[in-house]
Amino acid sequence: MVGKATGSLGLLFFMAALASAAPAAPDDSVVRDISGVAHHPLVPGEKMGSVLIFYLQDCPICNSYAPEINRIAATFTNFAFYIVQVDPDLKLEAAKEHARQYALHPAVLLDPGHRLVRQAGATVTPEAVVIGKQAGVAYRGRIDDLYVEPGKKRTSATRHNLRDALKTIQAGHRVKQRETKAVGCAI
């Protein structure tokens, strides 16, 4: 009986060794930015959350938000920020030139197949999606209320939805208004 038990135990160790030696499945969450650096935009890691800002390089509303996106990213350094370019026809060199022209500071990711768009539930650009530590959407919607509708803009924003959501998360609370209607160009 001991020989049979030892043989079974040996077989278990052999199978465990094979399983650990098997190549890992490709990580579907890894996305390279326009500089070739790998990121996990849906996994905040050490940060309090990931902020994905869905962007269309020829959308005037998106481009008008470039300075504000940079300011928010500079203020909330405990979050990982990503600009997610959604145009399926945008080439790498054009994305690099656009990022340079608009001085975009967050990592710029290309999403030509709209994988991140689907996973985050984005529908327009610019639209911010904040992924919390538990990998759930903590906030989805507008950056602020500067635009009432396409072509109709206030002189200044009266509500700063993304900033408020990030402050709430920083304070350790759940965002009360988890979704707002983003105004911009349809994806």
Image: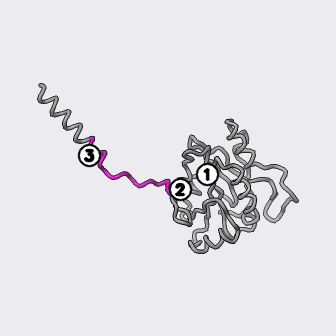
Check disc 3 and report the residue beneath it. Answer: 18
Q: Residue at x 71, y 44 (%)?
A: 165
The amino acid marked with disc number 2 is His
Dominant SS of magenta comes to loop
Please tell me which of labels 1 and 2 falls first in the chain: 2
CA separation, marks 1 and 3? 36 Å
Residue 68 position by quadrant: bottom right
The amino acid marked with disc number 1 is Ala
Report if residue 22 lies within the magenta region.
yes
Q: Are marks 1 and 2 in contact (CB under 8 Å)?
A: yes
Check disc 2 and report the residue beneath it. Answer: 39
Report if residue 81 lies within the magenta region.
no
89 vs 129: above or below: below
Q: Which residues are magenta?
A: 16-30
23 to the left or right of 97:
left
State the quadrant of the C terminus.
bottom right
Q: Residue furthest right?
A: 155
CA separation, marks 3 and 2? 29 Å
Q: What secondary structure is marked by label 3?
A: helix
From the top left corner, tell me how far across and down residue 42 is, in percent. 55, 50
